[in-house]
Image (tube, helix red, strand yellow):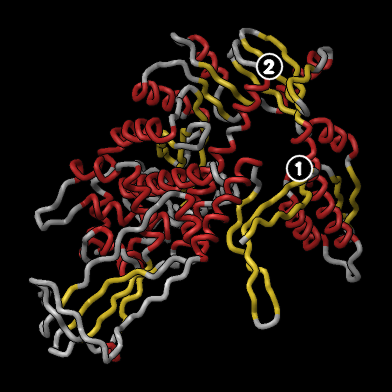
Amino acid sequence: MFLLCRTRKKDGKVHHNWSIAENHRAGKRITRRHVLYLGELNDTQRRAWERLIEVFDQDEGRARQMSLFPDQGARPHAPPVGHEQVSVLPKLTRIERPRQWGACFLADKLYRELRLEAFFAPRLGKSREGTDWEKVLRILVIYRLLCPGSEWKLHRHYFATTALADLLGVDESAAQDDTLYRCHDRLLAHKEALFQHLRQRWADLFNTRYDILLYDLTSTYFECDAPADENDPRKFGYSRDRRGDCVQVVIALVVTPEGLPLAYEMHPGNTADKTTLATMIALIQKRHGAARRVWVMDRGIPTEETLAQMRAATPPIHYLVGTTKARLARFETALLERPFVEVREELRVKNLAHENETYIYVESKERVNKERSMRRRALKAHWKRLRELATLKHPLPRDEMLLRLGKAQEKAGRQAASLVETEVTPEGTLKHKLNWPKLREARRREGRYLLRTNLEDQSPDTLWIYYMQLVHVEEAFRTLKGDLAIRPVHHQLPRRIEAHLFVAFLAYCLMITLRIRLKTHAPGLTPRSVLEKLANVQLLDVRIPTTDGRELLLVRRSEPSKDARLLLNLLDIKLPVQALPRMYGKEEKAV
């Protein structure tokens, strides 16, 4: 095996992406096989991977010749004292119940690393029938992490195809559909205590500090009729998923700059973003104290009244917020009179003090190149489509042309569509031209941001880094909606809808824990790719009949592939020893 580097240029920046590959001989040809994608590596990470590959290849080179069965003519060894000697019939060996083990094992290890079993076991307890609710919750969380879907799918299909019963020591009754639903009803009472527990675990595992908090909101919709109950949180409102025709709920999330979640809240779907901040600040102060913190938010969340309250609080609550284009236009004249200060390579700033606040005008060359490249690509595609519509061989009626123009503008996006002036004549002919004033304005503002803050002791470079960390909240939302598939929500009761978000929140905690573990070694390694690699490790039942009518059962896992072993070594995970064989009589009772 060896490290392979591929170079490509995207959005005006050169990227060097590394991966692990190996040469494989197929007859007379030698082909190259991709083993593991690593992403962009620094020099330290690259040397660490080279050493790991060298050690791994040395271990692979050691071969041992072992015999499975002794020679028929060899003299059998006498069994140890107190042990029974049996003769087996290897030709009648059966292999049964292959089930996925590797990814379940890793997910369970992450769950234990956060000590969630110790947190939930005394709180959830057991039912009178012996149902261990903590293990039912663990099944739900692992299912949400590995193969998100409905509780019905978990009950009817998924549980039987995995080794969760073997790992947790439960039977199929733990995955009954009514058991899964009743487990949801027991979760929300422990939400506040869970947030306190996670805060301590993040500090213990990653030495996390809580002086900077990132806050944002998203929504998730329901493809159902509007509920008749006025207290139901599913309401019509502004949809970030562009599904204004569906009812929804709003989700508020607070994370650290590393992406570690601290808290979430579910609000009715018609909740305005600006009305949630004061409530969330009060909750965080109640849970973690009124320590000095910086709240980093997007421009649409705080109101002027909320920001004034944050400045007047004792002690003051610090904030860093993006501003609207209207405010940028308001201060543009005053900012033009001030010189740029280069705080580091490719980053220039201007400061402007105004009414107990500091406005920071930031120009990032890297962001200029990226946003300009994105704008050019979108505008080029939109212009091509407009030219196609304008030069159709067979003219369309005006209404049909307007429909096609609307679809083209929707596909291009609001920014690219606003840069082109269009007109459809009564005959259905499309005319279009560039809006040069808007294009010049867009070019002037690409990669340039106006931030406002009440912090006085931080450099502009540091404040810019704080603001760019908002991508971690957006990444958390993408993970919840993508990898963890919180939608569709297969629940109708409000308490179970929030309990569904509670389970998804726990699954995200497992995923971000794995992501941070991987990031130190290779940023290109994603939690999903690691889970998919380990999912190939199976658990099987090997049944070997004996000559006296009994049956020897060996529950054995398959050996991890080469890339899976690399990942296990990287994460310093040692697989448990194989289970001891068991002997069964004719009545299928262990002896």
Question: Quadrant of the image for the C terminus?
Answer: bottom left
- In the rendered structure, are the residues bearing label 1 and label 2 in contact, judged by CB atoms less than 8 Å apart? no
The answer to which of 222 and 464 lies nearer the viewer is 464
Amino acid carrying label 2: it is Tyr
Task: Report the mark closest to the observer, 1 or 2.
Answer: 2
Neighbor class of circle 1 (other Cα within 10 Å; few <14, some 14-19, many 20+) is some
Report whether 38 appears left or right of 73.
Answer: right
Q: Residue at point 52% right, 30% down?
A: 214
Q: Is residue 563 left or right of residue 233?
A: right
- The residue under the point 75% across, 59% down is 403
Give the CA separation, mark 1 to mark 2: 25 Å
Residue 360, above or below 168: above
Quarter of the image where one finds residue 233: top left
Badge 1 or badge 2: first in the primary sequence: 2
Which dot marks residue 415? Answer: 1
Residue 568 can be seen, yes or no: yes
Say what amino acid the circle numbered 1 marks: Gln
Residue 530: image location, x then y, percent:
49, 56
| Quarter the N terminus occupies | bottom right
Q: Which mark is residue 113?
A: none
Q: Which residue is mark 2?
A: 359
Where does residue 412 sit, x and y in percent of width and height?
Answer: 75, 51
The residue at 40%/30% (across/down) is: 203
Q: How many marks?
A: 2
As rendered, which of 65 and 362 lies closer to the eye?
A: 65
Percent of width and height locating residue 438? 85, 36
Q: Residues within 10 Å of mark 2 (few under 14, many from 20)?
A: many
